[in-house]
Amino acid sequence: MLLKNKLLVEVIWIVAVLAILTWAAVSNASYVTNNQNSIANPANGDPVGTVINVTGYQWAWAFQYPNGTISTDKLVLEVNQTYTLVITSKDVIHDLYIPQFGVQSYAVPGHPNQVTIEPKKTGTFIFECVEYCGEYHYEMRGTVVVT
Amino acid sequence: MGFSFELMVFGSTIAALITMAFLLYYFTADYKRNLLGESASSLTKEQSNLLLTKMRREISFSAFFMDDSKSIGVRYLITSIVLFFIGGLAGIGMRISLWFPNPSFLTPIQYNILLTAHGNIMLYGFAIGMILAFGYYLLPSANKIEKDTLGVVKSIMFWLFLIGSLFIIFSKSTATWYFYYPLVDQLTEAGGGTYSFATLIGVTLILLAVTVSSVIFLKMVFLDRSKSIPLSKISMFSWSIVSTAVLVLTSAPVSMIANGYLIYDLINPIFFQAANGQVLGYAIMFWFWGHPLVYIAILPAFGLIYEMLPKYAGVPIYSYRAGVFSLLLLMIFSAVVWGHHLFNSGLGTIWDLLFSTTSFLVVIPSAMSVFNWIATLWSAKSIKLTVPMLFVLNGIVDFVIGGILGVYLADVGLNAFIHGTYAVTSHFHWIFIGLTAGIGFGAIYILFPTLTGGRTYNVPMAKVHFYLNSVGTIMMSGFWLVGGFAGMPRRVAGYFGIFQTYQDAAAVGGVILGIGFLIFLINFAYSAYLPAKVDVRNPIEDEVQVT
C-alpha cells in the first residue's frame, strides 16, 4: 500500500503543493509585470492618460480634475478613457478602494501613490475607504459615475 | 496632539501603584513561601521529582499565589478565558450594531472602541494567553523537566501580562490593533482615542511577558529536559512551542521598539513624520511583528493537533519527521512574508513580487502539516469521535478553508480586489476560531479531568457547544467571505445598504458563537462542582506518541 512508503508519500505531497504554488507564483508574477499600472505604485511623475489628483482627509475624498474643478465623494469618469489617480492624504493613512474596478491604493501622507484605471462599462459604482482612519471612517465612501 | 504634563503624572501614578501592589503581594501574602518557589533549585533532586509527579495543578485561584510552572499555566488559562469572554462580548456588540446599515445601537466612537478592544484582547490577551497557558501547563510534564526554576520571573511576567490586558481594556483606544502612525498620535476621541498610548503601553507589557516566557520555554525544552528524552523524540507540542518561541524572540522586540518610537513621537515627533516620507515606517515595523504574531497564535494549535489526533485515531502520527520539518519551516518562512499586508501601500512592484512569492512559499509547510494529519486519519483503523476530536477535525477543515483564502490574498492582483474587505476578516476568523480557539477548547476538554481534579465534563452539553461553535463560524465567516468578494469594507460602523444581507447573516452567526461559548462556561462551572469520579490522568501528557 502506498501509505506504507512514508518517504515517497512525503515527497509526493511536497512536490504536488510546490507545483501548484509555482504555477500560482508564476502567473502572479506575469500579471504583476504586465499590469504594473493597475496596482498601486509610488507616483513616478510619468502618469498614463488623464491625471486626477485624489486627496483623502478625515473624513472625505476630494477629486481634482485636470481642469481644476474639485468634487467631493463623487468621481465622474468617461467610459473607455484611461485615467491615472494620484492619491495622497492630508492627515492619516486612508485607502481608496473601488470594488467593481478591482483597484485600491493607500493614501499615505507624504508618499503619493498612483494607479491607472480604464472604465469599460457605463453606470454607477461605489468606492470606499478601507483603511481605518477614525470616527467617521465608514462615511468615507461615495459613488463613481461612468458616463 | 501633544503629550501633556497630566499624562506623565497619570503614567507615573499608575507605575507607582503597580509597583506598590506587587510589593504588597510579594511581602505580605501568606503564600510567600510558594512565591519564593517551593520548586526552586534549592530543593534536592528527590524533592524536586516528587513535586513534578504531584504537580498536577487544578484550576483554582490559589494558583495565583504559587509559582511553579503548572500554576503559572493555570493563571494564564483563567485569565485568557476571562479575556475571551470580554473580547467576545465586544465582538457580539459590534455584530448587533451592524444589523442596520446606519449605526443604531452603538455610536461610531463606541463601535470603534469595541473594534479596537476586540482585536487587541483576542490577539494579545486570548491568543497569546492561551499559548502561554498551554506552554507552561504542558511543557514541564511533556519534557519531564528535572527542575522547575525561575518561578519569580514567571510570576512577575504573568502580572505584567495582566496589567497589560487591563490597560488594553480600560484605555478606550480607537486606533485598532494596527496603531498606524498618524492616527494613534491623534489623542482625541475622533482620532486614535484620548488614551490610546495606554494601549501601546499595555501591548508592550504583554510583549515583554511573552518574550521572557519564550526564553523560559526554550530553557525548559533544551536545558531542563529529562536526559531520558533525546532531542529526536521530544513531543510535537514542544517543537511547536520551540518554533513559536523563536518567532517571538525574533519579531516581538521590533514591535516593542516601534511602540517606544510612537510614544516618543507623542512628545517630540521625529521618527515617523510625513515630512520625511516615513509614515509607512511604522506600518513596516508593525507588520514585521504583526505577521509572525498570527503564526505565533496558530503554531501551538498545530502542536496540540499533533498530540490530540493520534489519541483518538489510535495510531501514531503519520510522520513525525515531516511534522517537525513543517513546524520549523513555518517558523522560518512566516518571518519573511509580512509585506503582503502592505501590497497596496506603494512599496513598489519589486517588493510586492518578493512578498507575494514568499507568501506562496509559506503554504508549503502548512500543507505538509495538513497532509500529515490527513494521512494519520487515513491510516487509522477506527476513529473515536469524542468532543476534543470533533474540535480537532473542525479545526483542520477551518484551517484548510482559511488557508486557501490566504493563498488568494497573497496574489497581488486579487489582493487589490479584496484587501481591506470582509474577505480578510473571514480569512483569519476561519483560522482563529477554528484553530486557535477551537483547539484551545478541545485541549481544555481533553485536560478537563486534570484541570478539575478528576471531574468529567457533560458530554451532550460539550457537543452542543461544538456544533454551535462550528455552525456559528461557518455562518459568520462564510457570509463575510461572500460580502467581502462583493466589496464590503471591514472595520466600519455603518455600510452601504446593499450589504445588509451578509451583515445580518453574520450577526446571527456571531450570536450563535456567543451562545456556544456561554454553554461551555456553564458546562465548565457545573461539571467542576460535581464530585470527582475519575483518575486525574492527563491524556495529553501521559504518553507522548512519536514514531
Image (cartoon, coloured by chain):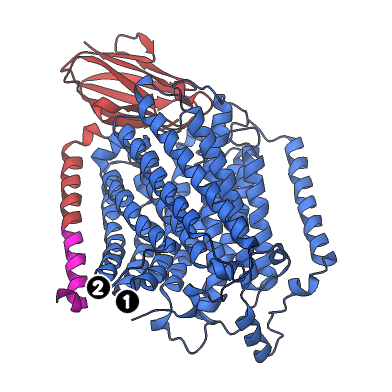
Number of the label disc, if any, that sits on residue B374: none
How many labels sit on residues? Answer: 2
Residue B394 location in percent, x, y?
36, 55
Q: Nearer the viewer, residue B329 or A61?
A: B329
Q: Are marks 2 and 1 in contact (CB under 8 Å)?
A: yes
Residue B96 location in percent, x, y?
50, 30
Query: SS of the residue at dot 1?
Result: loop
Mark 2 burial class by Cα count in 10 Å: few <14, some 14-19, many 20+: some
Colour of chain B as rendered: blue
Q: Which residue is mark 2?
A: B379
B306 relative position to B256: left or right: left
Residue B265 location in percent, x, y?
60, 40
The reply to whether the magenta stretch includes residue B222 is: no
Considering the image in quadrants, where does the N terminus of chain B appear?
A: top right
- Three-letter residue code for mark 1: Val
Measured in 3D between alpha carbons, the distance from the residue under mark 2 to the one under mark 1, in whole angstroms, is 7 Å
The residue under the point 59% across, 37% down is B269
Query: SS of the residue at dot 2?
Result: loop
Q: Which chain is red?
A: A
Range shown magenta: A1-19
Considering the image in quadrants, where does the C terminus of chain B appear?
A: bottom left
Of label 2 and label 1, which has the lower sequence position? 1
Mark 1 burial class by Cα count in 10 Å: few <14, some 14-19, many 20+: some
The reply to whether the magenta stretch includes residue A9 is: yes
The residue under the point 18% across, 15% down is A79
Q: Which residue is mark 1?
A: B315
| Magenta span: chief secondary structure | helix
Q: Chain of mark 2?
A: B
- Three-letter residue code for mark 2: Ser
